[in-house]
């Protein structure tokens, strides 16, 4: 099976052995059906958008990697796997079969599938979820409760059984059916023998689960009890799958197209959500990503409109003192404001005005031309509002090497200290 490796925003080099027009058409239709751009055409050539992951069309697999400092495919792949872990799509603990994952390091999708499959297998070996599931049947004895609605539609005297509804403890319940459905869907994406074997064993544990596949409403409505906590992440993947957030099984002609693509903006924002609390805690600040509802406008009837949703709100003694947004944008050194989008600047200024605070931060990925303390500052004339660009060495912050992580976190904390100190002091007075 041929594999193509490309990078975020770069040309997708399709091999001569494939029907280029058909593949391009499939990829563009895949992108059109997703919630975010995956591919785009530029002057007739196909490029990856700001996404990472992998997609498989027939026998062709395309791996899209982020650009790492190393510039090597193995380093890029490791960066992606680390980013997925910190963002919460992979477990933070090391996987059991490290050698197997390393052998698929150039294919992050396979590494992700393997880890999810091993997690499902571990949980299924303990027990397939059993729940009290209500069933309807005809019985000669009363069990559960009589279904009077069905009974009222019967002709009297023609049937000696009673329609009843009862709830036995069963493995064929909504949760187990969803888990089986996830295993089947992910097993179709697996390409290595080790990954396929894992999912085959998972599915063998669910052989007793019968009945139709779960509906979208059933999957989205699933609630996990504390006794089923081991399945929480898998159900999260099921909900993403059914809503086509990052796993999108589509069908084009006779060949299936499977993809597991992640927008880099989403991964970057989620990773910083986990990193920033550790960075600002020594500064006396807290950070939340869901603040109290605040709207930009109210109409004449005082009905709110345009809710503000900054990625991060920094608090001092419980009060907002600063807002921040994560932007996966590779800035350039030789243009005004380093190429920051105007829309982002307008948005940050709106946050400052409505929150009644003076400091805002755009967190951007650090590039090779930026030093560790890179932090340009911009002021809004006639106000005390300031917007700061803070370079985040995200590759080092998600590294598995403790010393590398610690150094990057220290640099981020030092950059934030200058911004937050004035805001915290002003709030205290």
Image: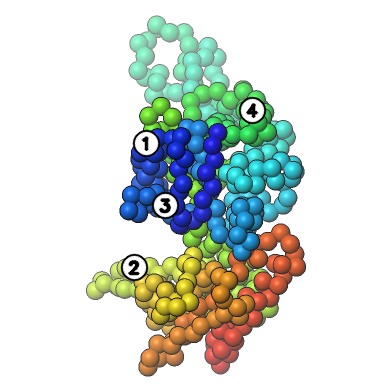
Please give the label number shown on residue 232.
none
Residue holding disc 3? 47
Please give the label number shown on residue 200.
4
Residue holding disc 1? 22
Report how far apart the C-alphas of labels 4 and 1 lie in the structure.
32 Å
Q: Determine the residue located farthest toward the top in the rendered image.
A: 158
Report how far apart the C-alphas of labels 3 and 4 lie in the structure.
35 Å
Which of the two labelled residues, at mark 2 and mark 1, occupies the earlier sequence position? 1
Q: Position of residue 157 (x, y in %)?
A: 40, 7
Q: Position of residue 422 (x, y in %)?
A: 56, 89
**Label 2 environment density (alpha carbons within 10 Å; few <14, some 14–19, many ≥20):** few
Q: Determine the residue located farthest toward the left in the rendered image.
A: 300
Which quadrant of the figure has residue 182?
A: top right
Residue holding disc 2? 306
Say which of marks 3 and 4 sits in front. 3
Looking at the image, is 14 positioned above or below residue 9?
above
Which of the two labelled residues, at mark 3 and mark 4, occupies the earlier sequence position? 3
Element carrying mark 2: strand
Residue 428 visible in the current orientation: no
Tag 4–tag 1 contact (CB < 8 Å)? no
Say which of marks 3 and 2 sits in front. 3
Which of the two labelled residues, at mark 2 and mark 4, occupies the earlier sequence position? 4
Is 60 placed left or right of 202 in the picture?
A: left
Element carrying mark 4: helix
- Residue at position x 54%, y 40% in the image: 3
Which of the two residues, 194 or 133, is positioned nearer the viewer here? 194
Which of the two residues, 75 or 108, is positioned nearer the viewer here? 75
- Residue at position x 72%, y 33% in the image: 125
Element carrying mark 1: helix
- Residue at position x 34%, y 68% in the image: 306
Report how far apart the C-alphas of labels 3 and 2 lie in the structure.
34 Å
Is 29 placed left or right of 200 in the picture?
A: left
């Amino acid at each position: 099976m041929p594999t193509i490796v490309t990078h975020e925003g770069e040309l997708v080099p399709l091999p001569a052995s494939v029907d280029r027009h058909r593949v391009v058409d499939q990829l563009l239709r895949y992108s059109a059906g997703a919630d975010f751009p995956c591919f785009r055409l530029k002057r007739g050539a196909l490029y990856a958008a700001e996404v990472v992951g992998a997609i498989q069309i027939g026998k062709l697999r395309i791996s899209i990697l982020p650009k790492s400092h190393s510039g090597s495919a193995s380093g890029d792949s490791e960066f992606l796997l680390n980013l997925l872990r910190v963002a919460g799509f992979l477990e933070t603990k090391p996987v059991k079969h490290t050698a197997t994952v390393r052998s698929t390091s150039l294919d992050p999708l396979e590494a992700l599938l393997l880890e999810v499959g091993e997690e499902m297998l571990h949980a299924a070996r303990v027990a397939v979820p059993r729940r009290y599931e209500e069933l309807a049947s005809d019985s000669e004895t009363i069990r559960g409760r009589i279904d009077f609605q069905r009974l009222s539609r019967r002709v009297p005297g023609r049937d000696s059984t009673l329609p009843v509804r009862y709830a036995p403890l069963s493995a064929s319940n909504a949760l187990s059916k969803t888990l089986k459905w996830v295993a089947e869907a992910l097993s179709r994406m697996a390409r290595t023998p080790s990954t396929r074997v894992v999912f085959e064993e998972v599915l063998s544990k669910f052989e007793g689960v019968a009945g139709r596949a779960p509906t979208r409403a059933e999957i989205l409505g699933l609630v996990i009890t504390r006794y089923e906590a081991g399945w929480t992440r898998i159900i999260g993947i099921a909900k993403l799958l059914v809503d086509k957030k990052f796993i999108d099984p589509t069908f084009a002609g006779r060949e299936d197209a499977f993809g597991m693509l992640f927008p880099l903006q989403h991964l970057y924002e989620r990773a910083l959500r986990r990193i920033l609390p550790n960075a600002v805690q020594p500064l006396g600040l807290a950070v939340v990503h869901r603040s109290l509802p605040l709207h930009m406008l109210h109409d004449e009837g005082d009905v709110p409109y345009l809710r503000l949703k900054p990625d991060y709100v920094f608090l001092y003694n419980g009060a907002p003192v600063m807002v921040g947004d994560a932007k996966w944008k590779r800035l350039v050194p030789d243009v005004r404001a380093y190429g920051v989008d105007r829309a982002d600047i307008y948005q940050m200024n709106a946050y400052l005005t409505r929150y009644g605070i003076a400091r805002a931060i755009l967190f951007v990925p650090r590039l090779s031309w930026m030093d560790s303390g890179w932090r340009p500052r911009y002021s809004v004339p006639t106000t005390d509002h300031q917007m700061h660009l803070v370079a985040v060495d995200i590759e080092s912050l998600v590294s598995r090497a403790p010393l590398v992580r610690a150094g990057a976190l220290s640099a981020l904390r030092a950059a934030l200290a200058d911004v937050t100190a004035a805001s915290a002091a002003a709030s205290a007075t």
